[in-house]
Image: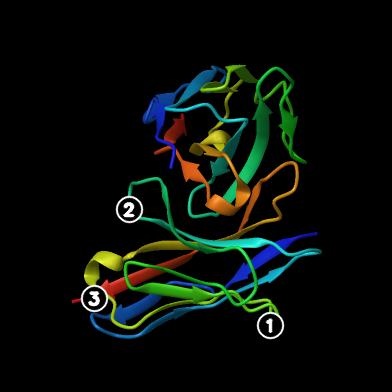
Amino acid sequence: SAVISQKPSRDICQRGTSLTIQCQVDSQVTMMFWYRQQPGQSLTLIATANQGSEATYESGFVIDKFPISRPNLTFSTLTVSNMSPEDSSIYLCSVDRRASYGYTFGSGTRLTVV
Amino acid sequence: GDSVTQMEGPVTLSEEAFLTINCTYTATGYPSLFWYVQYPGEGLQLLLKATKADDKGSNKGFEATYRKETTSFHLEKGSVQVSDSAVYFCALSMGDSSYKLIFGSGTRLLVRP
C-alpha cells in the first residue's frame, strides 16, 4: 500500500490564523481525500481532491474555509482558514488506487486552536 | 443515504477474552467493507476488509465476515491482548466515482491485564 507523509504532525494556532497541512504520497494516485476527526468522534470527509481539477467538497464544508491544492499526482495541501477553537481536530489525508484495496491514511495533524 | 452503525463503547475486556464489535450498514448497492484501527495517538490503519458477500477478512487474529442478508460486518477475535486496546472503526465504500469512505462512530476497546 502507499506510504503517506503528512505534516505538521501537530500544531497549536491562534484563532483567526490559517494553517496549511501537507500530504505527500510515495506513488502517483488519482484521488486524495481529506478527513476531519473531531475530539472523541469519528471521521468525516471534508473533500476529495483530483489532480488538475477543483476539489469536491462534502456538505457542510466550503472552499473558502478549507481550500485544497492538488498540483500533481503525489501531493496535496489542505488549509484551515480563519481558525476558531471549533476547528480543533485531527486532520487526515488518505489515498486509494482502487476502492476494493483499502485506503491508506496519513498519521494525521493534531490541530489545537486557542 | 449510505451509513454505518457500530455498537457503542467503550468495551472493556480482560486479557484472553472473546471480542465482538457489531457493525451494520445501510447501502443502496454492494459496498466494500473495512475495519480500521486507531491506536492511541496514532493515525488509522487498515485492519481487514471484504469486498463481496460471504467474504471473510482476517488479520492479526481478527476476523469479520461480510453478511449481505443481515447487512453486517461484525469484528471478532478469539483472545484479546492488552495491545489490542484501541478505537475500532467500521467503514464502507461504494466504489463509485468518489471512492470515499463512510465511517461508523468508532468503538473504543480497553483490554485489562
Residue B70 in which image quadrant: bottom right
The alpha-carbon separation of the residues under discs 2 and 1 comes to 32 Å
Mark 3: which secondary structure? Answer: strand
Q: Position of residue B98 (x, y in %)?
A: 72, 41
Label whose residue precedes the other's in the sequence (2 or 1): 2
Label whose residue precedes the other's in the sequence (1 or 3): 1
Residue at coordinates 47% horizontally, 28% vertically from top-left?
A27
Please, what is the three-letter code of the amino acid marked with disc 1? Thr
**In the rendered image of this protein, does residue B103 appear above or below residue A56?**
below
Residue A52 in which image quadrant: top right
Please, what is the three-letter code of the amino acid marked with disc 2? Pro
Task: Please say which color scheme the image uses.
Answer: rainbow
Q: Position of residue A70 (x, y in %)?
A: 61, 19
**Would you name the residue on which mark 2 appears?**
B40
**Would you name the residue on which mark 1 appears?**
B70
Residue at coordinates 23% horizontally, 80% vertically from top-left?
B15
Whether callout 1 and callout 3 share a subunit is answered: yes
The label on residue A4 is none
For mark 1, does the 10 Å Cα neighbourhood hold few (<14), some (14 to 19), or many (20 or more) residues?
few
Q: Position of residue A92 (x, y in %)?
A: 50, 38
Q: Position of residue B42 (x, y in %)?
A: 35, 46
**Would you name the residue on which mark 3 appears?**
B112
Label whose residue precedes the other's in the sequence (3 or 2): 2
Mark 2: which secondary structure? Answer: loop
